[in-house]
Image (cartoon, coloured by chain):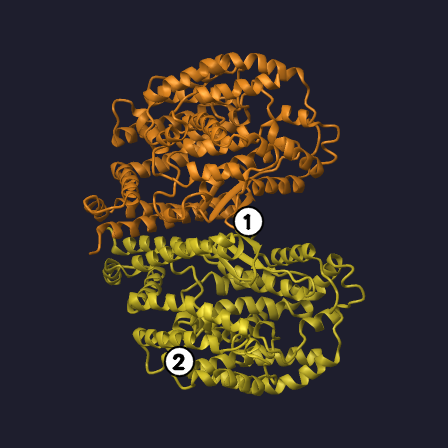
Chain colours: A yellow, B orange
Amino acid sequence: MARTFDTLLARMQELKDLSGVVGLATWDQETYLPPKGEIARASQLATLQGLCHERLVDPRVGEWVERAATEALSPDEAAMLRVFKVERDRAVKTPQALVKAIAESQSHGLAAWREAREAKRFAPFKKALQRLLELRREQADALGHDGERYDALLESYEPGMRVRRLEPVLGRLKDQLIPLVEPLATASARRPSQIAGRTFPKAAQWEFSLTLLRQMGFDFSAGRQDVSIHPFTGGTHPLDVRLTNRIDEANPFSAIFSAIHEGGHGLFEQGFAEADWRTPLAAAPSMGLHESQSRLWENLIGRSHAFWEHFFPLLRQAFPEALQGVTLEDWVFEANRVSRSLIRTESDEVTYNLHVVLRFELELLLLNDALPLDDLPAEWNRRMETLVGVRPENDLSGVLQDIHWAWGELGYFPTYSLGNLYSASIHAAAQRAIPDLEDRIRRGDLLTLREWLRTHVHAPGFRLPAEERVQALTGRGLTDEDFIAYLKRKYAAAS
Amino acid sequence: MARTFDTLLARMQELKDLSGVVGLATWDQETYLPPKGEIARASQLATLQGLCHERLVDPRVGEWVERAATEALSPDEAAMLRVFKVERDRAVKTPQALVKAIAESQSHGLAAWREAREAKRFAPFKKALQRLLELRREQADALGHDGERYDALLESYEPGMRVRRLEPVLGRLKDQLIPLVEPLATASARRPSQIAGRTFPKAAQWEFSLTLLRQMGFDFSAGRQDVSIHPFTGGTHPLDVRLTNRIDEANPFSAIFSAIHEGGHGLFEQGFAEADWRTPLAAAPSMGLHESQSRLWENLIGRSHAFWEHFFPLLRQAFPEALQGVTLEDWVFEANRVSRSLIRTESDEVTYNLHVVLRFELELLLLNDALPLDDLPAEWNRRMETLVGVRPENDLSGVLQDIHWAWGELGYFPTYSLGNLYSASIHAAAQRAIPDLEDRIRRGDLLTLREWLRTHVHAPGFRLPAEERVQALTGRGLTDEDFIAYLKRKYAAAS
């Protein structure tokens, strides 16, 4: 007898195909779309996303979900149903009028944010942000929560995570990071850069980034790397994963670490189990766990001494002029330089999470309407001084630096820190499972690690929530201990 | 009071957006999709196209069409409704089971065709072609016709055209072309090529093709050129038109004439009136009229002496080595060399339509089951000898050369000849309207012609059927006279 589940599965597959097409249309928007095409793409995407929403909230689909839950399902089918139901319930709870109002406010938000950035002053952005915050509060209340509105938004990016779980961990992390900054920044400042002023030719940088990705095991017959203004990982399917990168001739670290970072995301996307393709299980269970893979490759592997013992000789071959007189030790030091910088995306491993904590704390206040928007820029600057030890000269390098709030995205920033924390715990587990891991990295063998990650993180997909997956792998869930231990070990050796 | 037409218009716009996305997904398939992604793209496209079909044949849409027809509509709205209704009626008449059976047989057809090409023998393709022909007959009967099945298929590509209109024109064309071949091919054969054996570097060819497109007025802020195996014109919207091209270092004509040809298509796509975007009016009324624009630019302009008077000096700058000792006269002669060749896509202006006539005559027999498939390869070869004066050595350069039949596309070939005939008539009308057109071309002014074509051919879009548009523009509809007069004038001057 035909099961309702199979009817539902066909709809899940349809939605997965459509979201793949959305992936193509957004990737194209950032890579090849001619400038005047923007307006056409906007309506194409609005149509596609509207259709996805309609096909998801379709009342018949609700009936199928209920009926399928009573049928004989395999464990994987039950997992698919669970993941799909959560996604659908959230879509159903957000009224169409609110979805539309948010989309419109996002357009206004982006425009106002760009205007404010031009003026280097927060004021022109204030009204649009006010409106976005109101709508996000409304959305959070529509989605439902236990009194902590932020949880409802966090759930979009980090299912299962809660503020009461996150706050103590990030608080402890902050307390331990702050005292590390002063001595490390001072030590870094004493050692002048051996790289500054050199030119690293574009074509050779691009070629080297491809070499790194190939060595990591990124499958170029099932993916690509193209140029975009901001690097990101997109694509349409595990067999069609699209990384992007950009080249700065004066700063070779930009393309190198973007390649490794996006490559980490890309391996997750290529690593889903074939049986799960076109189902809700072929997805990371959270943005934090996704970020754990990019950060693990970028920082714990890509900034390690062992890694460059293999790759630095190749790098010198690729850039014989630019690296003349530069030693392996110089290079590794430069890749790990700690400084009190204003911009999150350019910050080092020690200060990065302090930038995140700043945003997380402010988001909590903003969503609860506990901070007047007029005070936001000054509050940002005050906290930046306390946390990182620098003060922005204007709002462009302060409260206006990230795009997230411009389209009302609250609840996303913590996933960056979760990624860092998970990355250290997962790396520690990998070291326990592969005792000679560091030696393998030193020999340029990155595939052993990729295989271990594929088995333990990528292939399981959305079967378990992120923290449970980490718990299963490391013996404990979210913790700052592995990350702090890693930083202390690394910088003890470096200093 | 709200009109039903406006509800219907929203659906038309949605379908236009979706077909834009289909355009992106197919363009990407031929340009950037990594090889393993093929299987993913196939299901994404099947889902998208299935959804388009579902949203088009939706019974509510049928009610809207009926009700809208009774409302107060502007002439443009009435035209939209008319075009949309024709498209919908055809979709409704083709049962879903037949659509699916055709899609499956196309996959088999392509695979069998490739296998047959490997073997250079028709036999492995026979069974798949048999099945495709059966399904096309079934489809033609489902669509309805006045006893001439071919008309029902022709209607997909050339709305309004009929076999009884086409046959006498193509017959006369054939009778006039055959006697031209012998003397021109003999004259060409006497003059050895000045280009053979030279190398035209890739990068310079690409750059030159972009120069040509820019000069034609193709708007690169609303379009691009990328590399694909077979050149084509695609895209998602008049503001996002995608041309493709390929480079052959030994044969500079390939990329140059493909750029001009696809550029002609691209100008049509970029030229629709802004008020028509996202409506059924922003489309060519037929493939033949679309082809008229590519052929007009490629042949009547791009192979003319006047054109190269301007561009040959630039070409010599781009290829100083390869063109050493080659004169403008040599180049123009080479661009217009006539030869008895086996392959349609490589044939010259004189023999091209003979290749088309061959296919058209065979398609009529095949669709009416009047030619046993076992006899098809020999019949092809026999007719090729009669028409063009050469005999294929095997089926690869004979009946297996085109992809069209591999996916059961019958009725398309005549549109190539319609394009040639229309191009000559439209060019003659342009010469009457712009008396100094040739002088302008000689000075490199291509924009005057583009503007005239935009006004008279592109911007009107789908308002009139192709032949009525040509009639309005030239004073007469489909005729071979302008084309034959053009060829005789051109080759009288050249010989």
Q: Position of residue A177 (x, y in %)?
A: 58, 84
Q: Residue furthest right?
A: A325
Q: Nearer the viewer, residue A244 or B482?
A: B482
Question: What residue does disc 2 label?
Answer: A367
Q: Nearer the viewer, residue B245 or B127?
A: B245
> From what the image shows, is residue B211 above or below residue B131?
below
2 or 1: tag closer to the N-terminus:
1
Query: Can you tell which of label 2 and label 1 is closer to the viewer?
Result: 2
Q: Nearer the viewer, residue B445 or A329?
A: B445
Q: Amino acid at mark 1?
A: Ser
Q: Amino acid at mark 2?
A: Leu
Q: Position of residue B493 (x, y in %)?
A: 60, 18
Question: Which label number is shown at residue A17?
Answer: none
Q: Quadrant of residue B181?
A: top right
Dot 1: element: loop
Q: At x 63% / y 31%, what residue is drawn?
A: B308
Question: Which label number is shown at residue A221?
Answer: 1
Badge 2: chain ID: A
Q: At x 59% / y 16%, what residue is drawn?
A: B185
